[in-house]
Amino acid sequence: MIKMTRIYITPSAGLKIRYQGITDFGNLYKYMKLWLEDRGFADEKKLETKYTERRFGDRKNLEIMWNCSTSISNYVSYQMQVTFLVLGLTETEVQIGDIKRKLDKGDFELRIIGYVKVGEGEWNDYTFLERVYYNLVVRKRIEEYKQDYYIILYKFVGYIKEFLGLRG
Amino acid sequence: MAIEKEDYVTPSAGYLITKHGEFNPDLIHKTIVGWYEKWKYTFTEKENTEKMKPQGNDLNLKLDGERKIDDYAEFHIEVVILVYELRKKGTSYTGKIKINVRGFVLLDYRNNWGKTPFTTFLFHIYNNYIIKKRIKDYYEDNLEDEVKELTGKIKNVIGLHD
């Protein structure tokens, strides 16, 4: 009998994206949120589970956590955890062409964990027919779900990397 | 030497490629990802770090590819790219680059064996006596060829002799 399980498509510690330099953090935060909302992973109210700001003079550190998921069926959902750790964030003025823009300078680290959650609730909560369906049908589709979610998650990672101007 | 669960075909610390001078990190990344795709590896970019520094940017990329061969063995090729003092020079870049390539065959990737001391013992016997020839002549040889091809491509793209 199959147990309720998490099938990781990233390393269990997550994918790490780190950028030390100047970027528009406000826009990054906003665009990432919109990206997830557009694809049904998040709604405004439930997404953020932690937002901590610590100030040290004119610098600040941020710790932000997002938990998001999208349900595929009664048995399967795609889960994602995003953690932001921003250190030494300061505002800086940058000349872009003729315009001076205020941007954010700091050490930006993002960790993204993604997994396919198979089974919701306890196994004992399912009826006999649901268990049979699960074992005969859902189990065989897990590989397809993994591939599907892998593509979605890497599009998200690509989007972030493109915003930060990272390679790859 | 006994065959372990992670059976390395490179030194366990990895095969090191170093260059000080001109190279293009974007092209290196593209070459490695393209190679993983060609050989149907499932590719994970574990880390992508860039630090802007006055003497030139530092990069740290960790790429990991895995490919299931059968129900028992999986090939793993990990590439770590470290770049220091990267500066743009015309259309190319200059800096210092270190690339580390590690390849190993992961045996019993489904973890069916090794749950108890007895099954761990059976796992050892199975690998080191029963299917030893298959591991040495098939898994290791094939992975070694693939690692060599990848390192060759990397050396080629950064302008080293292969």
Image (spheres, rainbow, N blue to C red):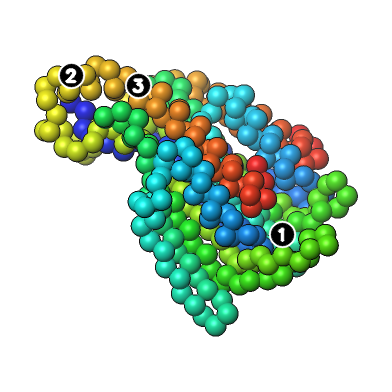
Residue A52 in the figure: left or right of residue B26: left
**Element type at mark 3:** helix
Residue A11 visible in the snapshot: no
The chain under label 1 reads: B
Percent coordinates x, y for residue B133 in the rendering? 44, 21
The kind of residue on which mark 2 rests is Val
What residue is pinned by disc 2?
A: A132
User: Which residue is located at x 50 percent, y 70 percent?
Assistant: A61
**Three-letter amino acid code at disc 3?**
Arg
User: What residue would you read off at disc 1?
Assistant: B57
Mark 2 on the same chain as mark 3:
yes
Letter of the chain that mark 2 sits on in the rendering? A
Secondary structure of residue under mark 2: helix
- Name the front one of labels 1 and 3: 3
Q: Nearer the viewer, residue B129 or B22?
A: B22
Within-10-Å neighbours for mark 2: few <14, some 14–19, many 20+? few
Residue depicted at 19% across the width and 38% down the height: A121
Q: Quick one: SS at disc 1?
A: strand
Q: Residue at x 12, y 25 (%)?
A: A127
* Residue position for label 3: A141
Front position in the image: B101 or B130:
B101
